[in-house]
Image (cartoon, rainbow, N blue to C red):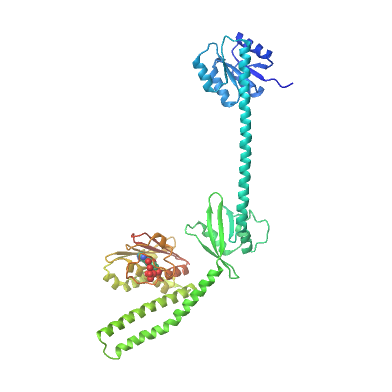
Amino acid sequence: MAKQDLILLALDPAPILDLMDRALRAAGYEVARASDRSGLDKSVQEAIPALLIVGEKFSNSDGLSVSKDMLERFPTLPIILYTDKDSSDLAKAALKTGMSGYLYPPLKIDDIVDEVQKSLARGRRLGDWLRREVRRTTSSLAEKAQISEAERNKLEAIIANIQDGVMVIDQNQNILFVNHAIREIFNINEKEITGRSLIAVIPNEDLKALLVRSTEETLKHHEINFDDGRVFNAQYTLIPKIGAAVTMQDITHFKELDRIKSDFIHTISHDLRSPLTSILGYTELIERTGPLNENQTEFIQRLQGSIQHITTLVNDLLDLGRLEAGFDTGREIVNLESILNYSLDMFDAQIKKKNLQITKSITLEAKSIRANPTRIRQMMDNLIGNAIKYTPNEGVVRVSISIQEDQIIFKVEDNGPGILPNEQSHIFEKFYRATNVPEGVQGSGLGLAIVKSIVDSHHGRVWVESGNGKGSSFIVILPTEE
Ligand code: ADP
């Protein structure tokens, strides 16, 4: 026999309670009674009734609020409200609360059983619907999980087979994932490396340096060199809540091309120097061979100006070649203040001609440093020369040398045309001239490349802070102890 439905009665003792009890038992239901609030709670929890009938007043409580409380905890439990007197307000309130039935006198046995049956049927429908919904949602979740698993596998397969090296590390620099290319690049044969320290598995000095520098905001690219001549460009990308990814591309071929190009430029510049010196010499001799007319003198002067220009360019190229090849290793104690004074003296005529206002400030302790004096002079000449060259007449140029935590800060500020933000990262490249260059201002685009090479060879940093029409500040940082 099927288990009987249990009907729980929460009504104060009265003839109606006995009538309901009898009527429901006669109709084949099991009946239980709750005499107070705590008894009701216990019975609902433990006996799990199929339906509850609550009196409008029950054990000093309001039947509506008891029902509301029950429905909050057991939303599918059908509840019928019994009241001594029919009132449309009470019926409305019962409906609003979510009760499923409403009984009031005069009551016949059939009325009670009818209402209980209807409420039970409605409750069952609700239960069935809920079960169906839960099943549907669960299967759609499982489907979604399956799709995302497939997507994940696809993504993993792509990253695993991509030609660039990809490695992902956690916040403690332990390996989470490396792809096939990384294994080949570093010749990793061990199978299980997940969870191990990246540096322990790949003890490469350049990679170590990349991880040390990873906190620097400006770090975008880093070269990783191998003894066999291969060079890779590594990029470090932070992944929030996971750690970081390092991707690597093989740039050996481009490096080789760059070297061939530099060698070619170096050879050409070297070979050009002697004929240039001889051309300049002969133009000077022409002047001595006899009196020249006005036109001839002017043409000779223009010729000499152009030869000077090409000679400067050739010298710059040769310098750059020497710096890039790392030949400038000589270091001595250099007095920064006197170098700065020499440099400013050299530009004195141009400063006066453009009527520029120059200010100079030097912190006492920042006067000397171990460096290559010729190169430091060259760096100052280029930065100060640019400020003077690009700043319009009556402009202001400020030069300062200060010290901060073992670092010398050399700064050249001007109120000239400034440099557009998208061009700032290029101005240190060879031959690059930005678009804001005022008409007629000559240049080769090599000065800042030389500055950058000098600063790099002294293990320092150089950058520009500028904006269109906002002037430019070039900042060089040199360590006092290399
Ligand atoms: P150039 O021989 O053209 O001066 P540099 O390498 O010294 O070459 O400078 C590269 C470019 O950077 C310049 O052509 C110019 O566009 C820009 N630049 C450098 N210094 C300044 C400055 N102080 N103010 C504005 N632009 C500058």
Depth check: give the residue in front, 158 or 366: 158
As drawn, is 129 to the left or to the right of 423?
right
Q: Residue furthest left?
A: 294
Identify the residue at the far right of this view: 1
Image quarter for ligand 1: bottom left
Whether residue 423 can be seen here = yes
At 45% across and 69% down in the image, what residue appears? 453
51, above or below 464, in the image: above
- Residue 146 higher or lower than 366, as above or below: above
What residue is rendered at 25% in x and 84% in y?
A: 294
Query: Where in the figure is residue 18, as x and y percent of width and height?
Result: 64, 10
Residue 452's x, y, as percent?
44, 68
The answer to which quarter of the image holds residue 394 is bottom left
Q: Looking at this view, is 135 or 53 the one in front?
A: 135
Residue 8 lies left or right of residue 410; in this view the side is right
User: Which quadrant: the N terminus?
Assistant: top right
| Residue 367 seen | no
Residue at the outermost bottom position: 289
The picture places residue 410, in percent across and down from the top left corner, at: 39, 65
Q: Which of the 4 quarters of the picture holds residue 199?
A: bottom right
- Is 35 above or below relative to 242? above
Residue depicted at x 57% and y 10%: 105
Can you give x and y, in whole percent of width and height, for residue 282 in the image? 35, 87
Where residue 370 sits, quadrant-wise, is bottom left
